[in-house]
Amino acid sequence: MDLSFTPEQEAFRAKVQQFLRDNLPAGWGTPGFRPPGTGTLAFLKDWQRRLYTGGFLGMAWPKEFGGQGASQIEMAIFNEELARVRAPAPLNVLGLTMAAPTIITYGTDEQKARYLRKILSCDEIWCQGFSEPDSGSDVAAARTRAELQGDVFVVNGQKVWTTLGHLADWCMLLVRTDPDAPKHRGLSYLLVDMKSPGITVKPLRQMTGESEFNEMFFEDVRVPRQNLLGAMNDGWRVATTTLMNERGTAALASVMRYRIVYDEIVDLARTTMRNGAPATQDPVVRQQLAQFFVELEMMRFTAYRTFSRILKGGNPGPEGSISKLAWSELNQRLQEFVMALEGPASQLMKGSPHAVQGGRWQHHFLRSRANTIEGGTSEIQRNIIAERVLGLPRAR
């Protein structure tokens, strides 16, 4: 595979870089910079709309759906440049990367016309209702029921770990419509209006103090049959498309993000003293930094392999589980390394005048614990790799 970019693609990269310079607040990305209002919902909606009007969202979508008809290469370049300057991700990221590709693949003409443009413009925010308290990453074990009564599904059950559930207008909801079928069958995929009577959303407080995730309760929620995506009882196949897009399309951007984190850790090691000398002179520290670099390169070439598959006309495959497993576990080791590097100062949180770099690494360390749970646990990813990539027999 030729990993170089054409002059036209490099010109597009320059266009993206100019857009980011013109539209991000002055000083964005510099250490300690916190422009007022950047964490607000209004700011994030405005940011996505700027990306949309700039022509940088849905780039590889067909033009009739509001896309640009661009190539996957241009989309990858854009994601990489966004990560390079740590620009905010689009607020409606689940709609853009998961709901929309699934609707494009399985939706009726009416569904495509109804939902896709509003996903791009951030007029409607989406969440994903897959995980449940008794099944977690075993998505096919979902027990939330949907009973078809005439032209309406009546939904009862509970979902958990729902990102953006407290902000969402719509939900990709996986439900069981045939309780007597094997667990990978008898599932259906519904598009649910979050303003429907009977839905209760409760934020879950994390150890970082944030509440990104939610639990959702469905009590006799009525969903029109026209909101069924794909065929009845074929929801597992539809959900697989959603999951493969979640793990496959942003791999290059993930590599860029963690390469930036790695470079910052190297800088921290250079300014941290150990035994009277910079920590980077310690052979154990140097060996660990070298190991991290090797793993980042492995991630980069794995991302290229996934990207190559997409360019050849395929969908993201189960190889995306390799990338998810790699970045989630690598980030935890990176953060643990920083805590060891800081020594006793690792116990000082944001607000302490003696905290290293304002205590920001402590927040990253705590947040990283979720990495091997969200988006599918490491155990589930290893099962996918074993069974669907390596072709090993399933455990009995």
Image (cartoon, helix red, strand yellow):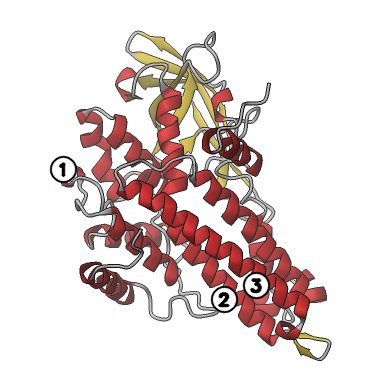
Residue picked out by circle 2: 263
Residue 335, horizontal then vertical, whole percent = 68, 65
Marked residue nearer the N-terminal end (2 or 3): 2
Q: Quarter of the image holding residue 267?
A: bottom right
- Work out whether 21 lies above or below 185: below
Q: CA distance from mark 1 to mark 3?
A: 48 Å
| Label 2 vs label 3, nearer the camera | 3
- Work out whether 3 lies above or below 382: below
Q: Quarter of the image holding residue 40?
A: bottom left
Q: Residues within 10 Å of mark 3 (few under 14, many from 20)?
A: few
Q: Residue furthest front?
A: 1
Element class at badge 2: helix
Q: Quarter of the image holding residue 95?
A: top left
- Visible in this render: residue 16? yes
Residue picked out by circle 1: 64
> What residue sits 43% from the left and 23% below the top?
235
Q: Residues within 10 Å of mark 2 (few under 14, many from 20)?
A: few
- Work out whether 106 lies above or below 38: above
Q: Assign the C terminus to one quadrant of the image.
A: top right
Under mark 1, the amino acid is Glu
| Label 1 vs label 2, nearer the camera | 2
Residue 217, horizontal then vertical, whole percent = 55, 29
Q: CA distance from mark 2 to mark 3?
A: 12 Å
Residue 131, horizontal then vertical, whole percent = 56, 33
Q: Is residue 339 left or right of residue 304?
A: right
- Visible in this render: residue 350? no
Q: Nearer the viewer, residue 307 or 347?
A: 307
> What residue sits 53% from the left and 51% below the top?
323
Element class at badge 3: helix
Residue picked out by circle 3: 290
